[in-house]
Amino acid sequence: MQQAPFIFFCRPGFESDCAAEVQAIATAHDLAGYANAQPETGYVRYYMFDQSSAEEFFGLLDLVDIIFARQWFWAKAELEDMPLDDRISPIIDICSELSSAKNVLVEHLDSDDGRELSKFCKKFSTPLTISLEKQNLIQEEGEFRLHVLFLANDHCLIGLSPLECSSPHKGGILRLKAPKDAPSRSTLKLDEGIQVLISRKQQKDAFRLGNTGVDLGAAPGGWTYQLVERGLQVSAIDNGPMDKKLMATEHVEHFKENAFTWLPKKPVNVLVCDMVEKPSLVANLMAEWLEGGHTQHAIFNLKLPMKKRFQEVADCIGLICERLEDADLDYFWQAKHLYHDREEVTVYFRLKTRVTPN
């Protein structure tokens, strides 16, 4: 008998990368399963071979540990050919057999077909939530998040995820509006990266008013803009021109120098980098800054190759980790293929040993 699948949302076109990563997680915990990933669908189904393995997998999965997944849940039921005049009743019947949840997300995939269901899901969410509350299937003390993922208007998957280990956002997508005065839309990548990858406590530490930052490959200033907005004094390193409005803030000093060789005279609080370079070159550069004690926090993008993207990311992160461990440095890292990322992954490293800028 086939086990109920685990569902992992991802960016369309990255299904194989997400599947490879989930398989690696299962293998690392000596759990046997297999993935079903169809190109451009925006999700992966992952099946365990037995119930006990599935339960163990459910208990260990945490979204922060999965780079290519935006959202996940354990699907307990799949409903097809639902009556269009009453889709709520069969969903309620299934939910009555599940553990109570604290909230519900009515979701769709980020594929072309999935986005066509966006308006329906938004409209359907309120009456479904009301019905679940009336049946006491949503309770304040619930430990899980209920997911209702529509694949068509009469076809859905229903399941659960732990509140603390999945995304509170529908489809795992944090939607942001581009600031009108930002030099480029790339600013959204860093904005999302900061919110998703850095805890609020560490954000307060990194982005205190008057802290210092460096943007390598800064022009025209999309990432510099985010640092300035958060109160940092920024050194922008790029031979290209910076946005005039951004320079007028007097919070940016522009150095027309090589981003691979420039170093600050004293350590800074935050380093950011969105250069279009080979990921291994960027990884080595970030390792040099961190092991040299030039920065406490580093946020950067790794531009991905066309094939074996998960392996490339794993290799680059492994390179940095190995160098920091050789330098006897304690660190934290997290990475995510963000909604505003395309052929790239955003990575965050933090040295746990205090780096003093002064």
Image: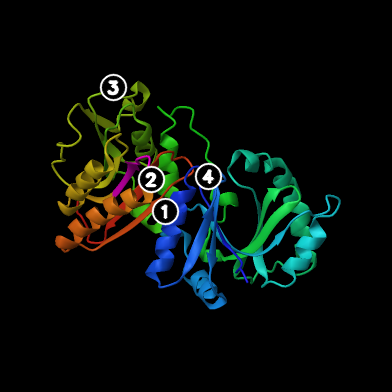
Measured in 3D between alpha carbons, the distance from the residue under mark 1 to the one under mark 3, in whole angstroms, is 33 Å
Q: Is residue 358 visible?
A: no
Callout in the foreground (1, 3): 1
The residue drawn where x is 22% and y is 25% is 239
Count how many numbered circles sit on residues in the image: 4
Secondary structure of the residue carrying tag 3 is: loop
- Who comes first in sequence, dot 1 or dot 3? 1
Q: Which residue is mark 3?
A: 241
Looking at the picture, how far across and down is residue 18, in whole percent? 46, 53
Q: Tags 4 and 2 in contact by the CB under 8 Å rule?
A: no
Q: Which residue is mark 1?
A: 67
Residue 184 found in image quarter: top left
Q: Which residues are magenta?
A: 298-307
- Who comes first in sequence, dot 4 or dot 3? 4
At label 3, counting other C-alpha atoms closer than 10 Å, the crowd grade (few under 14, some 14-19, many 20 or more) is: few
Measured in 3D between alpha carbons, the distance from the residue under mark 4 to the one under mark 3, in whole angstroms, is 40 Å
Callout in the foreground (4, 2): 4
Measured in 3D between alpha carbons, the distance from the residue under mark 2 to the one under mark 3, in whole angstroms, is 26 Å
* Residue 39 tag number: 4
Secondary structure of the residue carrying tag 2 is: strand
Specify whether residue 300 is painted magenta: yes
Looking at the image, is 210 positioned above or below residue 93?
A: above
Looking at the picture, how far across and down is residue 211, in whole percent? 28, 45
Quadrant in the picture for the N terminus: bottom right
Residue 257 found in image quarter: top left
The amino acid at mark 1 is Ile
- Who comes first in sequence, dot 2 or dot 1? 1
Secondary structure mainly formed by the magenta segment: strand
The amino acid at mark 4 is Pro
